[in-house]
Image (tube, rainbow, N blue to C red):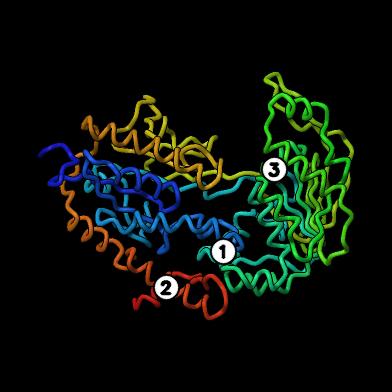
Amino acid sequence: MAEPGTRANPLRVAIIGAGPSAFYAADHLLKQEDLNVEIDMFDRLPTPYGLVRAGVAPDHQKIKTVTRAFARTATDPRFRFFGYVEFGRDISLDDIRRYYHQVLFATGAQSDKHMGIPGEGLRGSHPATEFVAWYNGHPDYRDCSFDLSCEQAVIVGVGNVAIDVARILSLTPAELARTDMADHAIAALSASKVRDVYLLGRRGPAQAAFTNPELKELGELAEADVIIRPDEAALDPLSQADLARDGDRALARKVEMIQSYAARPPAGLPRRLHLRFLVSPTELHGDANGHVSSVSLVRNRLTATATGSLVAEPTGETEEIAAGLVLRSVGYRGLPLPGIPFHDRWGVILNAHGRVLDPGTNAPIPGEYVTGWIKRGPTGVIGTNKPDSVETATAMLEDAREGTTFAPGDASCEAIAAFVRGRQPQCVTFDDWRRLDELEVAAGGRAGRPRVKFTSIEDMLRALGR
């Protein structure tokens, strides 16, 4: 048979995962004029779009419009979506090798890192990933429970996820009701007793990972004052020197905004969002029922390493903050997939520029590729995935043109569809998803909201008449 890529013998690609990195790669692969590519995209959930649906804050509707471009890719006749089909449960790597020329893993970073301090396992202490998935209606987390009866909550970390969580905890019921947040979360957060939210950053304002638009939003909250200590907003000499040397205008603007918040007198609003710098949690303390009750902090100072980077060093000065809810947002990591080489310390699939590597020889494994956070680690925003995915897709096309692919026994559309439906009869197509999307948007329209989400797989299948 001729090399794959012709009309008679298309290059068949399986993509595992349906988030932004998966769609960016699919779009690039389908744009090739000299190769005929056909793509099947698989996701363990019936819904596509990954963290755009389950991770982007529900009050950030503009960011979610990126799915319009993904939907255009999905309506290409050379593209198929198989939702509610899980790699490792319904299909295996051996199965993929029998039906496809290449496989691309785009499964993201689904797990969180731990703080590694005493008391982290107390009730009321959670990873921020769970909280985000809960309020976004992810089916795996819809039944989670978070104690919102306390008056003080602590969020460890100052990245965009941490600041999203802080903002969500500070929204009014009216603000929540205008979002596509899951109904169960709107009800719980509308009844929340939390009045003080603390974000803890171990380094200074110049090292905070959140972006300027996220920071600006804090000052626009209807009923929450932003509280920043002037001494923590001030830059230390090392940070001042770095900022002057780098000339980063966006970073300079970030520091200016932080310092302007610090100089602003509180307006006496019902809630307070405290942004702290140069502090690290050292222990969570619990009450008699094993529920978190307070957080011990140590104050830090910045020192320079041999390479010039600035790291936090404890000073020995300590304090304690009362808190009945602690959410850690100190980093994320990917999870290993059955049969795929994994770098456990880095939390990514072992790869070089998107080509999966054999751990024994460090040579590329023909036909296997990776993109997104499971490729490079949890860095960047949604748009960062585009060049990353193009790099991997380019490697896939180069290898296909050289004939370095799997050698499937039967790569026909019909054989693949029959196989997948035999393994998972309840699999969901993109047309099925469009029906679910229409139902959600229609329900949202009746409620004056962007959409009302299905939050259980059973309800999704029932809505499709399954």
Q: In which quarter of the image is the C terminus?
A: bottom left
Residue occupying the far left of the picture: 1
Q: Mark 2 points at which residue?
A: 438
Q: Which comes before the other along the chain, label 1 or label 2?
A: 1
The amino acid pointed to by label 2 is Glu
Which element carries disc 1, helix, strand or loop? loop
Which element carries disc 3, helix, strand or loop? loop
Q: Position of residue 206 (x, y in %)?
A: 74, 36
Question: Any mark on residue 144, and which?
Answer: none
Q: Quadrant for residue 307, please give it.
A: top right
Q: Name the residue under label 1.
A: 136
Q: Mark 3 points at which residue?
A: 116
Residue occupying the far top of the picture: 306
Closest to the observer, 186 or 448? 448
Q: Answer yes or no: do the residues labelled 2 and 3 have beta carbons within 8 Å? A: no
* Alpha-carbon span between mark 2 and mark 3: 44 Å
